[in-house]
C-alpha cells in the first residue's frame, strides 16, 4: 500500500517537476551509513529550529484570477503547474538516520502541526527548546487532500484550481500519508522498517547548537525550475472550463529538466 502511494506521489509530482534528482543535489548520492541510528540524547542545552515553507522564487507564480469561463474547442488542454496546497499534520525531526532496511526505533521531536490545507510558503513552525545535537532525518505527515493550481500554456494569466488527493485515488479524504527524508532519500515505513522510495529526494543533516537558531527551508521543486519546464494535459471531460474531480483527468506529464518534488535547504547560525 505504501509503495503504491509513493508511486502515485511521484506521478503527481510530474505535473510540476520531475521525480528523482541530480546526483549531488542537495547531498551526495551515495547512501549514508551511521552506526548510531538511534542516539541517546544526554547532552544539556537546547537551541531553536525553524521549519519554514518558501516559494520557489525563480519560477513565476500567479495568483488566483478566476476560472476560465469558456468551452475550449478541444477538451484537452496543455497546462503548466504553478503550485500545490497541502495539509501538513505533523513535522518532526530525529537524530537517527533514516536508511533503507533500518527499523524505526528513533526518538522523534515534534516541531509543529498544521490545522488547514494551504500553500507551502504559508507554513512556518518553530521549536525553541530542541535538544542540541546532530539531526539526520525529517518526518512529514500529510492529510490526503491537496489543491493543485495550473495555467494554460497559451494563457498564463488564467489559473485553474484542481482539488484532488496525494494518492490520486479520491477527491480528498482523511487518510494520513507519512514520508521520511534524510541524506539517503525519501522513505516510507512498512512493518516498522524504513524502505527507500526516491533516493534522489533528500534532506541534509543539520546541527542544533546551544542558544543558536537553525532554519530548514522547504519548497516545491528545485530552485531554478521555470514555469514552462514541466507540463501536463488536462482532459476536460465535459468541456466546461472547470476542473471536476472524479470526472476530469491529468495525463502525459513530462519535464525537460530533472528535479525533485520537495527541496530542503539548511541555514545555521
Image (cartoon, helix red, strand yellow):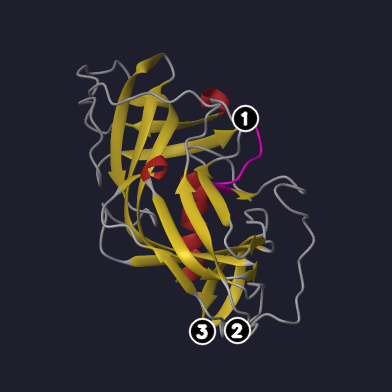
The residue tagged 1 is 224
**Residue under the point 72% across and 45% down:** 22
Based on the displayed image, in which of its 4 quarters is residue 91 positioned? Answer: bottom left
- N-terminal-most mark, 3 or 1: 3
- N-terminal-most mark, 3 or 2: 2
In magenta, the rendered stretch is: 257-264
Q: Nearer the viewer, mark 3 or mark 1?
A: 1
**Residue under the point 26% across and 64% down:** 174
Determine the secondary structure under disc 3. Answer: loop
The residue tagged 2 is 103
User: How far apart are the alpha carbons under marks 3 and 1?
Assistant: 38 Å
Q: Nearer the viewer, mark 3 or mark 2?
A: 2
User: How far apart are the alpha carbons under marks 1 and 2?
Assistant: 36 Å
Residue 90 x/y as whole percent: 39, 64
Residue 236 circle label: none
Residue 185 x/y as whole percent: 65, 61
Mark 3: few/some/many CA within 10 Å (<14, 14-19, 20+):
few
Q: Nearer the viewer, residue 202 or 164?
A: 202
Based on the displayed image, in which of its 4 quarters is residue 85 positioned? Answer: top left
The residue tagged 3 is 191
- N-terminal-most mark, 1 or 2: 2
Mark 1: few/some/many CA within 10 Å (<14, 14-19, 20+):
few
Query: Is residue 225 one of those drawn in magenta?
Result: no
Q: Nearer the viewer, residue 166 or 33?
A: 33
Determine the secondary structure under disc 2. Answer: loop
Amino acid at each position: 500500500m505504501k509503495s503504491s502511494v509513493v508511486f502515485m506521489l511521484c506521478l503527481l509530482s510530474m505535473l510540476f517537476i520531475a521525480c528523482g534528482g541530480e546526483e549531488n543535489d542537495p547531498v551526495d548520492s551515495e547512501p549514508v551509513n551511521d552506526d548510531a541510528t538511534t542516539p541517546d540524547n544526554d547532552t544539556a542545552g537546547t537551541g531553536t529550529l525553524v521549519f519554514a515553507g518558501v516559494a520557489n522564487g525563480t519560477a513565476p507564480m500567479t495568483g488566483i484570477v478566476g476560472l476560465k469561463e469558456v468551452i475550449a474547442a478541444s477538451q484537452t488542454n496543455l497546462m503548466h503547474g504553478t503550485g500545490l496546497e497541502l495539509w501538513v499534520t505533523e513535522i518532526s525531526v530525529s537524530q537517527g538516520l533514516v536508511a533503507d532496511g533500518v527499523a524505526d526505533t528513533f526518538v522523534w521531536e515534534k516541531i509543529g502541526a498544521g490545522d488547514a490545507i494551504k500553500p507551502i510558503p504559508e507554513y512556518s513552525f518553530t521549536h525553541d527548546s530542541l535538544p542540541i545535537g546532530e539531526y539526520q532525518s525529517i518526518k512529514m505527515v500529510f492529510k490526503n487532500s491537496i489543491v493543485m493550481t495550473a495555467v494554460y500554456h497559451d494563457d498564463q494569466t488564467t489559473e485553474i484550481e484542481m482539488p484532488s488527493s496525494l494518492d490520486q485515488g479520491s477527491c480528498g479524504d482523511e487518510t494520513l500519508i507519512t514520508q521520511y527524508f534524510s541524506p539517503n532519500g525519501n522513505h516510507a515505513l512498512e512493518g516498522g522498517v524504513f524502505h527507500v522510495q526516491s533516493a534522489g529526494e533528500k534532506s541534509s543533516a543539520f546541527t542544533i547548537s546551544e542558544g543558536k537558531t537553525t532554519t530548514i527551508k522547504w519548497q516545491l521543486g528545485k530552485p531554478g525550475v521555470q514555469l514552462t519546464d514541466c507540463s501536463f494535459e488536462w482532459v476536460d471531460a465535459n468541456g466546461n472550463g472547470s476542473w471536476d474531480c472524479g470526472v476530469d483527468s491529468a495525463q502525459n506529464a513530462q519535464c525537460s529538466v530533472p528535479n525533485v518534488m520537495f527541496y530542503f535547504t539548511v541555514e545555521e547560525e
